[in-house]
């Protein structure tokens, strides 16, 4: 399809979206462009082995990923693969790679005689060339932090054998640290690609964006689990989705739009803005939240929200239910002016709602604390307004 035509279709799709969705789509596309670009896969040589060197700090997943790549190239691309255990720092790493190699029936070059890593790499390369392997994957040593001996060793390997791909392992969970590591590695030994490991974890993966931007090096693969088949080619669009939590944001906006009682929300918002907040307002906010589903569902849909355990969630839900029961046992005057609820009123409410004095005190203390946090409360109440604004057509039609 020619570009003009596809652009016209793209515009048509865009104009069908609400302004909020359009905004998210534009940000998404921009993110995708920033994350992608460049060559997103390994290019294989013909007639001589393609040499891939895995580098990175300790525990980032080099050995595991070396095995995963060997498996991918062997099973999906029918390549003859040789692994090289060049991590002489950690003897267990040699056994780890050998076990992985055996499990996928791939050859593994091992030298336990104290030979220096660059010479082991050279011997493995000679074997790969002489025995017509398509790919040689070298698992190098990791360090706790970047140091000179490590860099010298890697530079030496690059000097004595023709390394086609130097892939840096980046742990998605390590955030800004990963950005610093990648930038330093790339300055010392030019990288041809990055592998983000542990993307099956909780990390949103914002580090991928910074690393891509800071180094200009393409992200080629994503590790999505501990098993040998848990490796994917890197998809910038999926990563953009993940960073934005896009599906979730749209669902949240739609849910709010569909379920929130706009008139009630507006009324409560206005009262909040005027600094008026009583127990009737609290009851109304809780009723609106109930309509959106469980609290954990709402919090889970907001990008960047820390995970809350089921136990904590159950506790919060019970507290909210109790507040509702207590407020319903109060007189209209008490709801409007909770500060008048003293000992005798409390014992009447206790009798009415079947809960304890302590629980009533907790509600009143919470109410006091909330009143002090009115500015943030305003923001929450405005979500309903935002949803409305997002779904309006900009031309007003
Ligand atoms: N969940 C998850 N775990 C991973 C992933 N990749 C690697 N791991 C785990 O991370 C841990 C460290 O992986 P290794 O492959 O031993 O790391 P390394 O970089 O070779 O470590 P050193 O040899 O000490 O430098 C292991 O427990 C792996 O199973 C991934 O994509 N997801």
Image: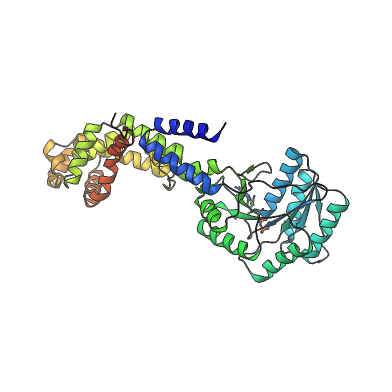
Name the one closer to the observer, 203 or 322.
Answer: 203
* Residue 256 coordinates in the image, percent (x, y): 33, 34
What residue appears at the point 55 percent right and 55 percent down from the top-left corner?
A: 211
Give the position of the C terminus as an image quadrant.
top left
Name the one closer to the observer, 13 or 84.
Answer: 13
Left or right relative to 129: residue 319: left
Left or right relative to 300: residue 198: right
* Residue 297 coordinates in the image, percent (x, y): 41, 37
Give the position of the N terminus as an image quadrant.
top right
Q: Is residue 293 visible?
A: no
Q: Is residue 183 visible?
A: yes
- Residue 172 in the image: above or below residue 186: above
* Residue 274 coordinates in the image, percent (x, y): 16, 46
What is the number of callouts on the image?
A: 0
Return the residue found at the far bottom.
Answer: 148
What residue appears at the point 78 percent right and 43 percent down from the top-left corner?
A: 79
* Residue 357 coordinates in the image, percent (x, y): 22, 44
- Residue 245 in the image: above or below residue 197: above
What residue appears at the point 22 percent right and 32 percent down from the top-left corner?
A: 263
């Amino acid at each position: 399809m020619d570009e003009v035509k596809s652009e016209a279709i793209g515009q048509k799709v865009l104009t069908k979206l609400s302004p909020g969705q359009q905004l998210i789509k534009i940000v998404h596309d921009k993110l995708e462009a920033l994350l992608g670009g460049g060559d997103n896969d390994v290019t294989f040589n013909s007639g001589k082995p393609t040499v891939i060197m895995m580098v990175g700090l300790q525990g980032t997943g080099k050995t595991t990923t070396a095995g995963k790549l060997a498996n991918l190239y062997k099973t999906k691309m029918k390549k003859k693969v040789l692994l090289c255990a060049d991590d002489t720092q950690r003897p267990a790493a040699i056994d780890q790679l050998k076990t992985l190699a055996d499990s996928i029936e791939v050859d593994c070059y091992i030298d336990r005689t104290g030979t220096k890593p660059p010479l082991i790499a050279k011997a493995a390369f000679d074997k790969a060339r002489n025995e017509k392997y398509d790919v040689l994957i070298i698992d190098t040593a990791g360090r706790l932090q970047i140091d000179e001996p490590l860099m010298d060793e890697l530079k030496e390997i690059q000097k004595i054998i023709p390394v086609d791909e130097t892939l840096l392992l980046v742990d998605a969970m390590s955030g800004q640290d990963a950005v610093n590591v990648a930038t330093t590695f790339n300055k010392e030994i030019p990288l041809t690609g990055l592998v983000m490991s542990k993307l099956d974890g909780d990390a949103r993966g914002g580090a991928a964006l910074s690393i891509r931007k800071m180094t200009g090096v393409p992200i080629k693969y994503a590790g999505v689990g501990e098993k040998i088949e848990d490796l994917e080619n890197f998809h910038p669009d999926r990563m953009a989705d993940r960073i934005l939590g896009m599906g979730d944001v749209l669902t949240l906006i739609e849910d709010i739009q569909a379920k929130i009682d706009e008139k009630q929300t507006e009324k409560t918002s206005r009262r909040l803005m005027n600094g008026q907040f009583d127990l009737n307002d609290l009851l109304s906010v809780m009723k609106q939240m109930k309509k959106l589903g469980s609290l954990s569902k709402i919090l889970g849909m907001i990008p960047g929200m820390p995970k809350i355990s089921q136990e904590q969630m159950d506790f919060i839900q019970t507290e909210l239910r109790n507040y509702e029961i207590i407020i319903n046992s109060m007189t209209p005057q008490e709801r409007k002016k909770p500060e008048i609820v003293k000992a005798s009123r409390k014992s009447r409410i206790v009798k009415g709602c079947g809960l304890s004095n302590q629980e009533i005190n907790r509600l009143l203390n919470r109410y006091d604390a909330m009143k002090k946090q009115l500015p943030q409360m305003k923001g929450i109440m405005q979500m309903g307004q935002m949803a409305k604004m997002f779904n309006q057509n900009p031309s007003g039609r």
